[in-house]
Image: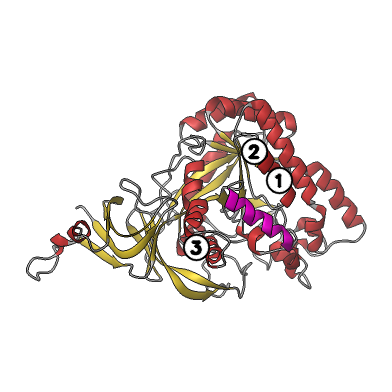
Amino acid sequence: MSSRTVIRGGLVVTASDEIHADVLIQDGRVAALAATGTPAAEAFTAERSEMGAPPPEGWGRVIDASGKYVIPGGVDGHTHMEMPFGGTYAADTFETGTRAAAWGGTTTIVDFAIQSVGRSLRSGLDAWHAKAEGNCAIDYAFHMIVSDVNEKTLKEMDLLVEEGVTSFKQFMAYPGVFYSDDGQILRAMQRAAENGGLIMMHAENGIAIDVLVEQALARGETDPRFHGEVRKALLEAEATHRAIRLAQVAGAPLYVVHVSATEAVAELTRARDEGLPVFGETCPQYLFLSTDNLAEPGFEGAKYVCSTPLRPQEYQAALWRGLRTNDLQVVSTDHCPFCFSGQKELGRGDFSKIPNGMPGVENRMDLLHQAVVDGHISRRRWIEIACATPARMFGLYPKKGTIAPGADADIVVYDPHAEQVISAETHHMNVDYSAYEGRRITGRVETVLSRGEPVVTEREYTGRKGHGVYTPRATCQYLN
């Protein structure tokens, strides 16, 4: 039976428009929009009753969004559910992590499947499919981490692009784990230039950082704050510059993940001014947190250990400016949560053993709305960097990332006036602390639809594991 939903009376905000409109949803997709109060909008619900009779059984539902925003569901292009790292695993499973994402207004994640050194890309991808299938509350897709570049894996890249895994992450950091040298990076970039794939780069000079780590520990500098001090901004900038030039040699586009340093933004800006297809992502932790958090007393700073690391507070201005000028295009979370108790504590007495990663998949949309309230970005830019551009960057648009006829009905009714306090007491991520504990923000998700199905209904969870489906992707649409 056809299912229908009408969202009435809200301000529909997309990356390109703001309009007071009603939204008609049929069979999981947006069917039409019409200005609120017009005959076209009234026609959406005209069949609901005749002469006061109740609506026909199975007609659908009407959601009142008066005084609220109606926005596309968020697209988080950078998550790590169930990721193995440093002898432990990220605390969120695909079940708990996608449920938390939905609570925060995100309706699609792109997670990272991992190729182990010596194994095929296919075996890594199959392992991640097995983790996610039947467990997700929202739709999901995969990038592929390429840890071992050789003739076989280069050929596999072509096959993966054909079946909708169209982006490949490489690391200039973590020697002995994920690290690729410049020759391996160049070969993968050359392959991507041929097959239409997008290379994503963790840009830090890991070889140099390991020297600084060893020296710091020898000096007895073991506290969490030293994690930020050894992973120097200049080494992020150097690696960013090197990745850009390797991509230029290969004739390939480049997407630099979790940009945190002013100097790295400058490298991206320079490359884009040269007309190169180079893109940058930052994350809420770099926009809202700083080395002050890493230096919290006792071992509390361990909660904020991630790579790239948090930077001094004055770096935030360059990141916000980059988001306004479009030298940075996307805000993703790099959600990779480890509990303070029993996981982050693995690094007591040695900051290099603290699992790198922070929780955030539930907080991104709200924190970026706070940035609208604070005047850093506009409403439409909020939707652009959190929904539309990640969808375009990773080949999901306009199925995801917008509200338009034919798009999946991944829609959030958002209350811009509600106030909340972020806390581990009330969040839904499977982790025992919040990186934003006690932070007061304005704006809150009220109702979330995924392909027309209610996942959160007026602040109650009504979703289910297994609703979310794997979504193959086209190649990068941001180049078009």
Classed neighbour count for the residue bearing mark 1: other residues with Cα under 10 Å, few (<14), some (14–19), many (≥20): some
Q: Looking at the image, is mark 2 or mark 1 nearer the viewer?
A: 2
Q: Is 80 a magenta residue?
A: no
Q: Amino acid at mark 3?
A: Ala
Q: Earlier in the sequence, mark 2 or mark 1?
A: 1
User: Which residue, given by chain and number where applicable, does mark 1 sit on?
Assistant: 266
Left or right relative to 78: residue 297: right
Q: Out of 409 and 87, give the one closest to the viewer.
A: 409
Q: Secondary structure at mark 2?
A: helix
- Residue 89, position in %: x, y? 63, 55
* Residue appearing at x 46%, y 49% in the figure: 388
Mark with earlier residue (3, 2) = 3
What secondary structure prevails in the magenta region? helix
Which of 202 and 479 lies nearest the eye of the viewer?
479
In the picture, measured across the screen, residue 153 lies left or right of residue 304, that is left
The structure residue drawn at horizontal position 74% and vertical position 41%, both measured from the top left corner, is 239
Left or right of residue 182, residue 332 in this image: left
Q: Amino acid at mark 2?
A: Asp
Please tell me whether mark 1 sits on a helix, a strand or a loop. Answer: helix
Residue 158 falls left or right of residue 397: right
Asked whether residue 284 is in view, the answer is yes
Q: Which residue is mark 3?
A: 100
Report the span colored magenta. Answer: 313-325
- Residue 207 placement (x, y as % from top left): 81, 42
Q: Where is mark 2, residue-wise? A: 273
